């Protein structure tokens, strides 16, 4: 089996990323997977790119097996004043292809995102995960994450 490599996403990767986001119980009701891909995804990607800098990236990190994209996550570094100005990494939208689950793709993807975050000076990694995703919670706990905070969201 080909090993996993990592790279940042480009416009050309958006259909594969959206397919990964939709390859999930929650995502299949949230995403619009069609050909051509709706313009809103390209606009959102462009907005992420415009906010991104070398020091504070806001990018999609891809896990690839050969030419196939088998996992993704959004990695954003956030500067702030709390915790003595500590730089933190925010992870969002973690997905692994249903065909590749259980093959350590997710572990490698999270590990790579933490390595990138450390290299850029972050000392804290944070994310939210839906309360109903019990398997995901166990996965993150095995990687050393602690459910130390309660997250809240409001549709507006």
Image: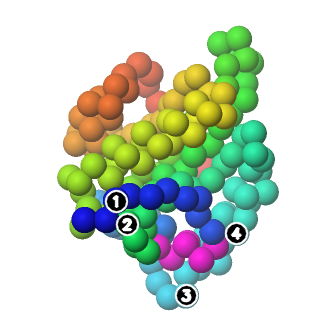
Magenta stretch, overall SS: helix
Residue under numbered circle 2:
65
User: Real-space Cα distance between discs 2 and 4?
Assistant: 27 Å
Can see residue 17?
A: yes
Q: Residue at x 52, y 36 (%)?
A: 115
Q: CA distance from mark 2 to mark 1?
A: 6 Å
**Dots 2, 1 in contact, CB < 8 A:** yes
| In the image, farthest residue toward the front | 2
Categorize mark 1 by other alpha carbons within 10 Å: few (<14), some (14-19), many (20+). Answer: few
Which of discs 4 and 1 lies nearer the camera? The answer is 1
Position of 20 relative to 58 (above/below): below
- Identify the secondary structure beneath mark 2: strand
- Residue nearest the observer in this picture, 110 or 140: 110
Q: Earlier in the sequence, mark 4 or mark 1?
A: 1
Compare marks 2 and 1 and give the one earlier in the sequence: 1
Residue 71 image position (x, y, % from top left): 40, 59
Q: Which residue is mark 3?
A: 36
Image point 25% across, 65% down: which residue? 1
Magenta-tinted stretch:
11-16
């Amino acid at each position: 089996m080909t090993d996993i490599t990592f790279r940042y996403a480009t416009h050309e990767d958006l259909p594969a990323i959206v397919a990964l986001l939709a390859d999930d119980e929650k995502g299949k009701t949230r995403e619009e997977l069609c050909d051509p891909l709706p313009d809103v995804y390209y606009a959102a990607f462009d907005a992420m790119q415009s906010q991104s800098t070398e020091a504070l990236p806001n990018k999609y990190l891809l896990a690839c097996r050969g030419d196939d994209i088998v996992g993704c996550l959004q990695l954003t570094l956030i500067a702030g004043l709390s915790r003595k100005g500590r730089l933190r990494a925010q992870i969002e939208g973690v997905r692994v292809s249903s065909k590749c689950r259980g093959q350590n793709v997710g572990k490698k993807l999270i590990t790579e995102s933490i390595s990138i975050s450390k290299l850029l000076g972050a000392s804290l990694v944070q994310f939210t995960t839906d309360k109903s995703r019990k398997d995901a919670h166990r996965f993150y706990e095995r990687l050393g994450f602690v459910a130390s905070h309660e997250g809240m969201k409001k549709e507006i």
